[in-house]
Image (cartoon, coloured by chain):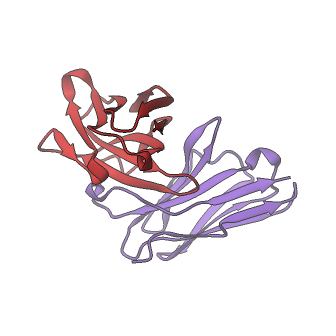
Chain colours: A red, B purple
Amino acid sequence: AQSVTQLGSHVSVSEGALVLLRCNYSSSVPPYLFWYVQYPNQGLQLLLKYTTGATLVKGINGFEAEFKKSETSFHLTKPSAHMSDAAEYFCAVTFSGGYNKLIFGAGTRLAVHP
Amino acid sequence: DAGVIQSPRHEVTEMGQEVTLRCKPISGHDYLFWYRQTMMRGLELLIYFNNNVPIDDSGMPEDRFSAKMPNASFSTLKIQPSEPRDSAVYFCASSKAALDYGYTFGSGTRLTVV
């Protein structure tokens, strides 16, 4: 069965600092991996995705993530945090033939301090 | 493109009443998903449809919950009778058949059962 673990339910960084949100997955077949962001009182918005090909993927708002099969990880990073990045971030996994059914992690709330 | 449209945005109802949540997916999307989000349980997939047909309803909590998709442009999630523990944010999402597209989420319905 597939699953996703997000390490750290809360992460706090200073404005301008590196953002690192951790995601590890479990899948017996090649995974498709996603990061979503949720701003207060809004739905989830797709940040980036990995399906096949290049393992370093770039998304919106300066975020990127790297698929590391050997570590079963798909960590999200951003070189310099901005106040507007404060939100909740969700990692999700599925696989080809998974009938589009995404399994979400528990989420990581990112706080950005001046 | 107006995105996924959910109504109402907020619903407050008394215990025992029937509640109907509505969703209009993006035109051309073949999949529709209903999720529930709570602090305690995070994002839970309740049910999803492919080409208007329910595929997996294993996440529906109990018989009080039902969902329908009478056509490609409309879906409902009904709770009858409602209970205080049903209080949550309910999200609808849609996607194309190719998973590369990811999900598009609506803004959610915040349900409060008093």
Question: Residue at 33% across / 38% down in the picture?
Answer: A16
Residue extending farthest left: A53
Q: Is residue A73 left or right of residue B62?
A: left
Q: Nearer the viewer, residue A4 or A48?
A: A48
The location of residue B54, given as percent across then percent down, is 51, 59
Q: Residue at x 57, y 39 (%)?
A: B42
| Quarter where residue B111 is shown | bottom right
> Is residue B90 shown above or below A67?
below
Q: How many marks?
A: 0
Outermost residue, front side: A114
Decide which of A8, B75 is in the foreground and name it: A8
Q: Is residue A104 left or right of residue A22?
A: right
Report if residue B61 is visible in the image: yes
| Quadrant in which the N terminus of chain B appears | bottom left
In the visual, does B1 lie left or right of A55?
right
Percent position (x, y) of residue B33? 49, 57
Q: Quadrant of residue A25?
A: top left
* Residue A1 seen in the current view: no
- Percent from the top left, x then y, of residue B62? 71, 46
Q: Spot the residue most to the top.
A: A71
Q: Is residue A80 above or below residue B76?
A: above
Q: Choose between B15 and B75: the one closer to the eye.
A: B15
Looking at the picture, does residue A50 appear above or below residue B6?
above
Identify the residue at image location x=38%, y=45%.
A82
Q: Residue at x 75, y 53 (%)?
A: B64
State the image coordinates of residue A67 (x, y, percent, origin top left).
22, 34
